[in-house]
Amino acid sequence: MSWQTYVDDHLMCEIDGHHLSAAAIVGHDGSVWAQSESFPQFKGDDEISGIMKDFDEPGTLAPTGLHLGGVKYMVIQGESGAVIRGKKGSGGITVKKTNQALIIGIYEEPMTPGQCNMIVERLGDYLIDQGL
């Protein structure tokens, strides 16, 4: 299965009539493996490096926020070294780290944070089980 198929069929899938507003699978080095058409362009290498640093040293993004595509998300609870969750207004972001990639989902209301977490983390757990 192609990386784009994972984005199109698994991350951008519909749940209770809602779906993510944007999603991507990105290598640890910041290279984009696949993304939805609506996924924002990165505004510099420091966005992904900041996310990777927070996975290595949990809490480093809390004071500054998580930046993606020039948008700042307030970092909220996650799972140390595995998941970062962020909030901005009525939407937010979930980032799940696998062995080789970051699974990123961005949502807006009426999708809930829990629905976004479920979609992103389920695919991330599957890829980890596959050794990816």
Image (cartoon, rainbow, N blue to C red):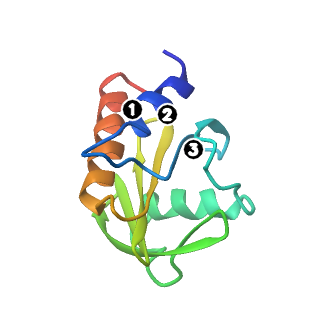
Q: Residues within 10 Å of mark 3 (few under 14, many from 20)?
A: some
Q: Looking at numbered disc 1 in the image, what kind of residue is underneath it?
A: His
| Residue picked out by circle 1 | 10
- In the figure, 96 relative to 132: above or below? below
Closer to the observer: label 3 or label 2?
A: 2
- In the figure, 97 relative to 107: above or below? above
Q: Residue furthest front?
A: 17
Q: Quadrant of residue 87?
A: bottom left
Q: Looking at numbered disc 2 in the image, what kind of residue is underneath it?
A: Val
Label 1 sits on a secondary structure element that is: helix
Determine whether label 1 and label 2 are within 8 Å by CB. yes
Nearest to the observer: residue 120 or residue 81: 120
Q: In the drawing, what numbered circle is on residue 7?
A: 2
Residue at coordinates 39% horizontally, 32% vertically from top-left? 10
Label 3 sits on a secondary structure element that is: loop
Q: Looking at numbered disc 3 in the image, what kind of residue is underneath it?
A: His
Q: Residues within 10 Å of mark 1 (few under 14, many from 20)?
A: some
| Residue picked out by circle 3 | 28
